[in-house]
Image (cartoon, rainbow, N blue to C red):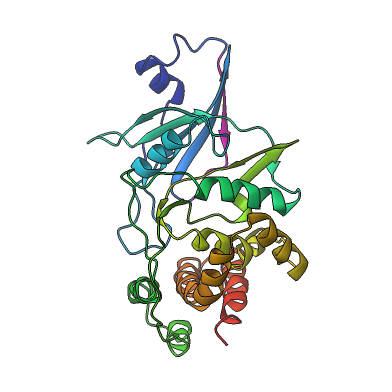
Amino acid sequence: MSEFDALAFLSSKRLIQASNGVRLEPLKGGYWNEVYRIQGDGFDWVLKRFYQEALRARLYPMLPDSEALALKTLKGKALAPEFVAYFPAQEHERAVLIYHYVPGSLYSGNIANIATLMRQLHKLDVADAPFRVLPQTPEEILKQADELLAASQDDELGRNLKALRPEAIAMPLVEKPSLVHTDAWIGNFIGENNQLRLIDWQCPGLGDPAEDIWTFLESGFQQLINLPLYSTTEKVSFLETYADETLKKRLELLRPYFAYRVAAHCVMRIQDFKDRPQDKKAYETVLETVLEQLT
């Protein structure tokens, strides 16, 4: 990979006039991007440069155009980082997204505040925005899980999971699709004082808000960073604050299908991390959690 000069890039796009006095700090990025904090006179930005993703089925794909669209859609709503600029991928350049830096660290406050943020997000009228359409019914969710398993090696974990595949039941689509983050686990909530933002919008879509609620409350992804599962009291508090009885009913019905799909994702990640024991163990722990919802 050729070395990337973030300040030269910003200068070439006329977002900064000169690099003198501008501070650049590499941040911890994800598996599919590199991230920098850029600070100067009157601005404090994050620059995210996307890598080329592996061409196989993934539950959480890297969709730079969609992340930019999400931040544009949410600009000024105090739900996500504030959009600054976006430069789509070109023949010899990777996609680059720039947004305002969100101060703070991993949110550790009352999860009822996260429920309030999600409720505000899911109530937005974005049905006409050109986001991808997400699977909503049990049949569609199971089909996606099958694709994940088909893209994985046919090992014992995968074969054991297929034996637990739930039967699809008939369910209607939601009346009005919501903007769904799809990866709304605690690691993507940043907050300081009374401010809270949902970050890393790399794979949003239009669909069922129950997906975000299940991901946050039930997926067990917080175990990836050694945080405990949520208690029954915390889950009840979250759902009471979110205050949507129709969603609660859909959530209960969809739980095994979401669990099966994330289990398929975990099988893939365990295989990806076969030479990285710590990461492999983390996904094995999450897999155990979601399997309990299938047995």
User: At x 64% / y 53%, what residue is drawn?
Assistant: 115
Q: Quadrant of the N terminus?
A: top left
Location of residue 209 in the rendering, given as x and y in whole percent from the top left corner: 49, 58
User: Eyeballing the image, is 180 above or below 39?
Assistant: below
User: Eyeballing the image, is 150 above or below 245?
Assistant: below
Q: Is any atom of residue 25 visible in this view?
A: yes
In the displayed structure image, the side of residue 26 where residue 9 appears, left or right: left
In the displayed structure image, the side of residue 33 where residue 186 appears, left or right: right
In the displayed structure image, the side of residue 128 where residue 219 appears, left or right: right
Within the image, what quadrant is residue 2 found in? top left
Q: Quadrant of the C terminus?
A: bottom right
Nearer to the camera, 3 or 85: 85
Q: Is residue 162 magenta?
A: no
User: At x 57% / y 80%, what residue is drawn?
Assistant: 291
Location of residue 161 in the rendering, given as x and y in whole percent from the top left corner: 47, 84
In the displayed structure image, the side of residue 295 where residue 143 appears, left or right: left
Q: Is any atom of residue 276 visible in this view?
A: no
User: At x 66% / y 58%, what residue is drawn?
Assistant: 225
Within the image, what quadrant is residue 249 found in? bottom right
Nearer to the camera, 113 or 12: 113
Q: Is residue 27 magenta?
A: yes
Given the current orientation, which residue lies at the most extreme left position? 91
**Which residues are the magenta region?**
22-30
User: Eyeballing the image, is 292 above or below 85?
Assistant: below
Location of residue 264 in the rendering, given as x and y in whole percent from the top left corner: 45, 74
Within the image, what quadrant is residue 33 found in? top left
Location of residue 223 in the rendering, given as x and y in whole percent from the top left corner: 66, 64
